[in-house]
Image: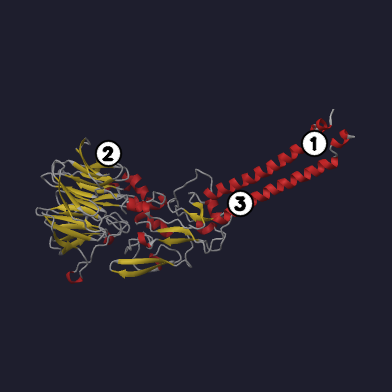
């Protein structure tokens, strides 16, 4: 045996000793790393996974209850769409359903058959369709007009970066546009010339001004020749002449079924053929019918019918919360109520129960 | 003789064991040091999109009065006359009477701006982080009120007592140079809000 061979030889005790050293170092380092990773994970989550409890649901349960005797409509149908975002609904005199969805206008029959689609360059936010099939589409800051064949007939100028158009209605000679960003109703003539600004605060005319806390600001031309405008921050529906005089208003803030709940409702409304109003609320998503004087007549559907929509407004319901859950409503020639739910991405059709 | 030298005595063996233990301690110390260094670069914060305003922030902070406070992002506020973060669900009147306020400590100051707008300012010295206002604002309004850990108070504990009990997993470590998680921003703009 040579010297070099002697040096290379390792005894059992040396082997065990070195193993203990290596193992000790490895265990120490591993333990420290484990501790670090463990702390990091604890810091990142602070809890065990799978224990999320939404405690906010309970709070609205009592407020959302509706007396079943008040519900005088039943769900009769549903229109589904593959669109990612629904913005507005309109029904033409032929009872075709128009949806402003994504960057298009989609047309459906009442039984849910997709009839046609008009592709747009930007996102439509509101629309109305006249008896001769002309579609008036409100984009964020301007109005586009399309022929029944889908050809663009006109585009009325930009209203500035603060403009957020949320509703559009047409009378015989005028077009009315609700601008939530500037809190004003704009009256155009048929050629697109701005004729009047309606609803701006004016103490000399006893006009209180519109309060629009969130991007919901609806209007409609009613059969009595007045312009009806929702004033959501005041929980009212107001009636104006086409010249901008405030004639009357109705509506009260209340969590109760007869009033408009929360900070800013109704978000949208439509007018039935007999002059009654169908209103939509957010927060407590409910659809109700009021008579022409503002008295509650019946409930189309309460919060229970819009469970998914209600969750959007609950804590943890999404990044945009109540600002994106507002339902839109339209009515057809027979008085059926079409509710567009942007959360479920469907249109639900409600018919009045005959013996209600 | 060479064979005897290569043998390890009991004393050598113990010495080696002590060395190993020292290395173990060194490894552990380095780990702890690393942990502490990392901890100093991050702070605790609440993700407002996950927070469910369960009121645990108010009770579980090691401070006598929680470091969690309500934050008001004015750019998102609707300046509502009837603020559901300020008023009880069914207030007797829309005034500053204590019986009408949802905040148990009166930490929200309501001020008239111009008809019909009102501003709501949080008095942080009174806010206890209960989140009652957050619930109301989110349920009906724009969600401009939300809870945040205020870093002029937070002790930045290694194991935050609130994070441990948070049922929504809303507590997380964020970089110390960006210590707040605010709502809104680019996502809102993309939605046209």
Q: Which residue is located at x 71 percent, y 48 percent?
A: B25
Single out the mark in the foreground, 1 or 3. Answer: 1
- Note whether B95 is above or below A51 in the view shown: below
Quarter of the image for residue A73 reads top left
Q: Which residue lies furthest to the left in this view?
A: A172
Do discs 3 and 2 share a chain?
no
Mark before the other along the chain sequence, 2 or 1: 1
Indicate the position of residue A331 as horizontal and vertical percent values. Answer: 19, 46
Q: Which residue lies furthest to the right in this view?
A: B1
Protein chain holding label 3: B
In the drawing, what numbered circle is on residue A81?
2
Task: Determine crowd level at label 3: few under 14, some 14-19, many 20+ residues with C-alpha closer than 10 A.
Answer: some
Q: Can residue A354 be seen in this view?
A: no
Label 3 close to label 2 by CB (< 8 Å) = no
Left or right: A222 as drawn, with respect to B139:
left
**SS for tag 2?**
loop
Residue holding disc 1: A14
Q: Quadrant of the N terminus of chain A?
A: top right
**SS for tag 3?**
helix
Left or right: A81 as drawn, with respect to A21:
left
Q: In which quarter of the image is the C terminus of chain A?
A: top left
Marks 3 and 2, how far apart at CA: 51 Å
Front-lying residue, A46 or A285: A46
Label 2 close to label 1 by CB (< 8 Å) = no
In the drawing, what numbered circle is on residue A322?
none
Q: Which residue is located at x 30 percent, y 58 percent?
A: A264
Protein chain holding label 1: A
Residue holding disc 3: B35
Do discs 1 and 3 share a chain?
no
Task: Determine crowd level at label 1: few under 14, some 14-19, many 20+ residues with C-alpha closer than 10 A.
Answer: some
Protein chain holding label 2: A
């Amino acid at each position: 045996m040579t010297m070099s061979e002697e040096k290379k030889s390792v005894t059992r005790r040396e082997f065990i000793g070195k193993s203990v050293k290596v193992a000790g170092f490895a265990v120490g380092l591993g333990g420290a790393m484990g501790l670090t990773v463990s702390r990091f994970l604890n810091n990142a989550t602070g809890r065990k996974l799978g224990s999320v409890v939404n405690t906010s649901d309970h709070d609205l349960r009592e407020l959302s209850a509706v007396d079943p005797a008040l519900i005088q409509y039943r769900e009769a149908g549903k229109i589904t769409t593959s669109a990612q975002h629904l913005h507005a609904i309109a029904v033409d005199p032929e009872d075709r359903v128009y949806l402003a969805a994504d960057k298009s206008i989609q047309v459906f029959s009442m039984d849910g058959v997709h009839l046609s689609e008009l592709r747009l360059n930007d996102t439509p936010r509101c629309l109305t369709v006249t008896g001769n099939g002309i579609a008036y589409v409100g984009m964020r800051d301007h109005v586009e007009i399309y022929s029944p064949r889908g050809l663009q007939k006109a585009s009325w100028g930009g209203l500035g970066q603060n403009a957020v158009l949320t509703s559009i209605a047409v009378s015989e000679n005028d077009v009315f546009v609700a601008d939530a960003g500037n809190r004003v109703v704009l009256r155009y003539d048929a050629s697109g010339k701005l004729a009047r600004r309606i609803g701006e605060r004016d103490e000399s005319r006893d006009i209180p001004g519109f309060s629009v806390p969130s991007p919901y600001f609806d209007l409609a031309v009613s059969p009595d020749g007045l312009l009806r405008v929702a004033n959501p921050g005041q929980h009212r529906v107001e009636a104006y002449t086409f010249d901008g005089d405030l004639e009357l208003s109705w509506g009260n803030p209340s969590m109760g079924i007869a009033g408009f709940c929360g900070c800013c409702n109704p978000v949208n409304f439509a007018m039935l053929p007999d002059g009654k109003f169908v209103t939509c609320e957010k927060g407590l998503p409910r659809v109700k019918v009021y008579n022409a004087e503002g008295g509650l007549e019946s409930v189309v559907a309460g919060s229970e019918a819009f469970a998914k929509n209600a969750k959007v407004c609950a804590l943890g319901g999404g990044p945009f919360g109540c600002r994106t859950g507002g339902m839109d409503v339209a009515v057809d020639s027979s008085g059926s109520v079409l509710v567009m739910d942007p959360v479920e991405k469907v249109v639900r059709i409600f018919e009045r129960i005959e013996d209600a | 003789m060479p064979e005897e030298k290569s043998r390890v005595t009991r004393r050598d063996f113990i010495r080696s064991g002590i060395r190993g233990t020292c290395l173990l301690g060194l490894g552990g110390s380095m780990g702890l040091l690393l942990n502490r260094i990392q901890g100093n670069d991050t702070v605790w914060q609440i993700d407002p999109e996950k927070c469910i305003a369960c009121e645990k922030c108010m009770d579980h902070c090691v401070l006598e009065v929680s470091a969690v406070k309500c934050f008001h992002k004015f750019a998102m506020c609707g300046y509502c006359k009837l603020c559901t973060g300020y008023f009880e669900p069914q207030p007797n009147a829309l005034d500053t009477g204590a019986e009408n306020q949802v905040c148990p400590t009166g930490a929200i100051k309501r001020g008239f701006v111009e008809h019909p707008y009102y501003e709501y300012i949080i008095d942080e010295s009174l806010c206890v982080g209960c989140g009652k206002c957050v619930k109301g604002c989110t349920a009906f309004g724009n969600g401009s009120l939300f809870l945040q850990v205020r870093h002029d108070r937070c002790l930045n504990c290694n194991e935050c007592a609130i994070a441990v009990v948070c049922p929504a997993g809303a507590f997380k470590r964020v970089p110390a140079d960006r210590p707040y998680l605010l709502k809104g921003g680019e996502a809102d703009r993309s939605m046209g809000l």
